[in-house]
Image (spheres, rainbow, N blue to C red):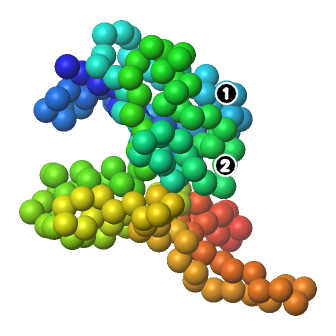
Amino acid sequence: MKYIVMDIGGTFIKHAVMDENYVETEAAAWPTEKDPEKFLAQLVEVIKSHGEGYGGVAISMAGFINPVTSENTDFGCSERFTKYNLRQKLNELTGYRISVENDSNCAALAELEFGACKGCKTVAVMTVGTGIGGAVIVDGKLFRGKSFKAGEYGFALTSYTLEDGKIVPHYAKATSALVQRCSDAL
């Protein structure tokens, strides 16, 4: 059986077809739409671009994904990630079974199964992309934490400033901040 797989990032939606042996074909990347309605239509278009007859769609994306409902419970970076329960909405629009998981959790599980963490029982993985994320594996199982936020290094307090008598925290930034700093310098 083959599946449509997507990694939804703040900059690009990377997608492909993958078989049960994890062999990837038809890989492509599309810039991520910023408007929530266009974003949803774009995901449907990505799925339809691969044709029909797949076993389902697997999505990795930023956010705090409830493993039972697949809802993104608390990701304030962009409305496009929180406006819809993507599993439910994409199932309604495409008829496919949809699976949604946090992108850093997916990376950690892949490292545990195929990568540098193979054979390990307890690991911590940090991901660096548009933002910074992370995941924790304890005794060979994904550790999500109470609010599905375990291992989220993007919340690491890096500094703070005092503005109008109030403390303003600053958190870890990644590629998007580097691009902004380079643009400012140029």
Give the x, y percent position of residue 160: 69, 86
Q: Residue at x 53, y 77 (%)?
A: 156
The answer, for residue 167, to whether it is visible in the render is yes
Snapshot quadrant of residue 93: top right
Q: Which image quadrant is residue 112 in?
A: bottom left
Q: Secondary structure at mark 1?
A: helix
Q: In the displayed structure, would residue 99 be above or below residue 72? A: above
> What residue is pinned by disc 2?
78
Do the CB atoms of the residues marked 1 and 2 lie less than 8 Å apart? no
Image quadrant containing the N terminus: top left
Residue 114, compared with residue 1, is above or below; it is: below
Circle 2 — which element?
loop
- Which of the two discs, 1 and 2, labels the residue nearer the N terminus? 1
**Depicted 172 relative to depicted 33: above or below:** below
Residue 54 placement, left or right of 148: left
Q: Report which residue position mark 1 lands on.
A: 38
Q: Amino acid at mark 1?
A: Lys
Residue 132 relative to residue 124: left or right: right
Q: Is residue 142 left or right of residue 92?
A: left
Front-lying residue, 33 or 105:
105
Quarter of the image where one finds residue 181: bottom right
